[in-house]
């Protein structure tokens, strides 16, 4: 049985009742029938939180995806298979990651459209995040312009939506620059999860996002680093 990933459709669920469907006492993990906890993937770190069961409380310290299964690593007592557990997300941490992840998409889009540089790497953090672009050789003036443009869009409160679309539909919808992101996905994926910053960007992604640009908050670009071979690393924080 596969774990239902609640955040794929709703990133704002903070609590949920689930059932333990598998337990590993040695490695101290459990699998749940449905989960609100995000497993580290695509530059977004794992969620943390707690579970409550039979009047007890244990910590979820890490969530990892392994062979398509979602393992919740527990600190404290481990519930038995079949137990009902209340899942409680560390919302502050997750909300930070949501803002950072949406910010990453927006900055990717701005740099793709203006400088034709693709995002080739990214690491989202609690306080700051970084992204690698190629081919790009930025300078202070460019970064300042990007920051201003970004913060203008933040003020406009543009909706960010999640939808599931057929491969063909998305490929028809997106522009040439973005088509490559979608066509790169394995053919086996018939339905693609699309993060849409209305009128600005469409991107295939499995991460968690805020629902409009205002929620992201203003960006402060901290600096750039040349990583060689026309690769630029840009780091940023949010207000
Ligand atoms: Zn993403």
Image (spheres, rainbow, N blue to C red):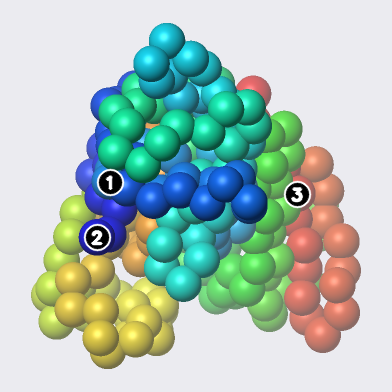
Q: How far from the left and from the top, in percent, is residue 24? A: 52, 51
Quick one: 138 or 188, which is closer to the camera?
188
Mark 3 touching mark 2, by CB under 8 A? Answer: no
Mark 1 touching mark 2, by CB under 8 A? Answer: yes
Quick one: 48 or 67, which is closer to the camera?
67
Mark 3 touching mark 1, by CB under 8 A? Answer: no
Instruction: For marks 3 and 1, give the CA distance.
Output: 37 Å
Residue 10 makes an appearance in the image:
yes
Residue beneath label 2, please? 1
State the residue at coordinates (39%, 58%).
206
Element marked by disc 1: loop
Instruction: For marks 3 and 2, give the CA distance.
Output: 40 Å
Residue 200 makes an appearance in the image:
no
In the picture, measured across the screen, residue 95 lies left or right of residue 220, that is left
For residue 190, above or below residue 196: below
Q: How far from the left and from the top, in percent, is residue 51? A: 46, 25
Residue beneath label 3, please? 235
State the residue at coordinates (48%, 15%).
56
Instruction: For marks 1 and 2, give the CA distance.
Output: 7 Å
For residue 135, above or below residue 42: below
Of the image marks 3 and 2, the number of the one nearer the N terminus: 2
Disc on res. 33: 1
Image quadrant where one finds the C terminus:
top right
Q: How far from the left and from the top, in percent, is residue 147? A: 64, 42
Please tell me in which quadrant of the rendered image residue 41 appears: bottom right
């Amino acid at each position: 049985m596969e774990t239902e990933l609640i955040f794929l459709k709703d990133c704002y669920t903070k609590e949920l009742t689930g059932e333990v469907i598998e337990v590993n006492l040695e490695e101290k993990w459990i699998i749940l029938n449905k989960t609100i906890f995000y497993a580290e993937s695509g530059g977004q770190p794992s969620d943390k939180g707690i579970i409550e069961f039979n009047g007890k409380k244990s910590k979820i310290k890490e969530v990892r995806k392994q062979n398509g299964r979602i393992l919740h690593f527990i600190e404290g007592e481990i519930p038995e298979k079949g137990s009902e557990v209340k899942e409680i997300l560390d919302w502050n941490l997750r909300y930070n990651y949501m803002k950072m992840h949406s910010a990453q998409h927006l900055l990717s889009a701005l740099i793709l459209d203006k400088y034709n540089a693709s995002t080739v790497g990214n690491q989202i953090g609690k306080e700051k995040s970084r992204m690698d672009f190629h081919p790009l050789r930025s300078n202070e003036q460019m970064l300042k312009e990007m920051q201003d443009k970004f913060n203008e869009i933040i003020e406009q409160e543009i909706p960010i939506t999640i939808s599931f679309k057929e491969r063909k539909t998305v490929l028809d919808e997106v522009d040439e620059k973005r088509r490559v992101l979608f066509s790169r996905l394995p053919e086996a994926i018939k339905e693609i999860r699309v993060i849409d910053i209305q009128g600005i960007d469409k991107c295939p992604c499995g991460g968690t996002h805020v629902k409009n640009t205002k929620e992201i908050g203003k960006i402060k670009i901290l600096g750039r680093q040349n990583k060689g071979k026309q690769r630029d690393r840009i780091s940023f924080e949010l207000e």
